[in-house]
Amino acid sequence: MTHSDDMPLRAGASRADITPPLDVGILMGQGRWAPFEGVRLPLQARTLLLECGAQRVALVSLEILGISGLAFGGREAFKASICDASDGTVRPGDLILTATHTHSGPETMGLTDLYQTAAFKNWAKSLAERIGESVRQAASRLSRARLVLGSASAPGLAIHRRIRTTEGVVLSHPPPAPEKVISREGPVDDSVLVEGLLDDDGRPISLLVNAVCHPVHEMCIKFISPDYPGEMSLALERSHPPAVALFLSGCAGNINPVLVSDGAEGSGSHGRELAKVVERALGAARPVEVHEVQLKRRSLALPARTGAGRPGAPLRTEICAVRMGEAGLVFVPGEPFVEIGLTIRKASPCAFTAVVACAEDSIGYIPTDRAFDEGGYELGPGRWARVARGSEEIVRREALACLTAP
């Protein structure tokens, strides 16, 4: 048996049900929400707690649309309330929140007036309590762990959704008339990156899965569902009990599944296929030495626009990164375009780098500068289009700085 001195890393994981009442509704379009009509699958908060020496990091994957300071009464206040509910298990600076970005979860990005309703406010309070309890439970399950890293490819699950037409750039859904299409070319990221935390017997304590595609199979369908990320997590957890599988969204700002709003069948098929890819990656995963866990944060100010598309005050937000041996996880706010994630990963000093979007702060799309010349939905104007030209370079630079910081 390996002695604790040889294996300083410890890990614990847990789940908590965060399904909202039906009147904490779904995003139905620009500035519009509607109550849910039922629950297809409950929503979960999945938590991984890492401990190495004096450093603790709590990573929480939430099956919601996003994490908006506006919606939750201030980002720092929301995190502080989670830590209070955890009985001080972690400090706010050691807590990382990510959203799976399911479009069939509650509208939590402050894109509508839903967050002003009493139903939302009551649920938000209970959400902080449930996440805090999940963190506390994960801490109670801490045990020695080792890290393995794997990757595989999932071609065909996602497409570049920005299509150049005679009428400008449009989204892949609804599909444009064929005679208007100039080009469908654009990058995708088919890679699926897996980090496994294994116990002494080689069984997964937790699986972290980073994949790149918008969860919009059940968009505008009024039944609560975690979409394909939840289906993937459930499939993996059935295969590896009692492991907790966290989906970590990649840079999918301009990446969609082949079909949109095709319902539960599309979500299930996508999630199960992704779980198979994860199993392949896990089967070929290699162990890596971990002697410390490092968490670095960097504040940044992005050039910004108002909801009407005019120049606005700088948008202040944050990027953070976790390093374990040769593995790096960098957490980026909002919805970066896929090109940004690919560039960060290529330039990363870590041999294994996962770029996680929709983390900590919902700031809308982060397009490339080229996209500002092309236009299209993601460029707005609207509440989802808050950053201005020049944000791409700042996000890349600061993400890499987080990964390289001593």
Image (spheres, grey):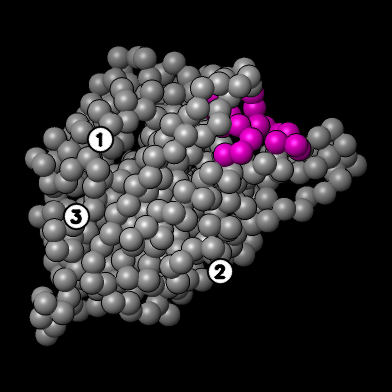
In this view, 205 is above or below 233? below
> Badge 1: how crowded within 10 Å, few (<14), some, or many (20+)?
many
Q: Which mark is residue 384?
A: none
Q: What residue sits right under mark 3 in the picture? A: 56
Observer-nearest of 33 and 113: 113
Q: Which residue is mark 2?
A: 153
From mark 3 to mark 1, how far is it between C-alphas?
15 Å
Q: Circle 3 sits in a helix, a strand or a loop, which is it?
A: strand
Which span of residues is magenta-colored? 372-391
Query: Identity of the amino acid at label 2?
Result: Ser
Q: In the rendering, at what x and y percent does residue 60 appear?
A: 30, 47
List x then y, in percent, for residue 111: 49, 23
Select label 3 or label 2 by which is in front. 3
Q: Earlier in the sequence, mark 3 or mark 2?
A: 3
Indicate yes or no whether the magenta region holds residue 114. no
Above-or-below relation of 274 to 300: below
Asked if the residue at tag 1 contacts the one at tag 2, i.e. Cβ–Cβ closer than 8 Å, the answer is no
Q: Residue under circle 1?
A: 79
388 drawn magenta: yes
Of the residues shown, which amino acid type is indicated by label 3?
A: Arg
Q: Tag 1: residue type?
A: Lys
Q: Is residue 87 visible?
A: yes
Q: Residue at x 48, y 39 (%)?
A: 334
- Residue 233, visible in the rendered structure: no
Image position of 1 (left or right of 311): left
Please tell me in which quadrant of the rendered image residue 191 appears: bottom right
The answer to which of marks 2 and 1 sits earlier in the sequence is 1
Location of the N terminus by quadrant is: bottom left
Per the image, label 1 sits on a secondary structure element best described as helix
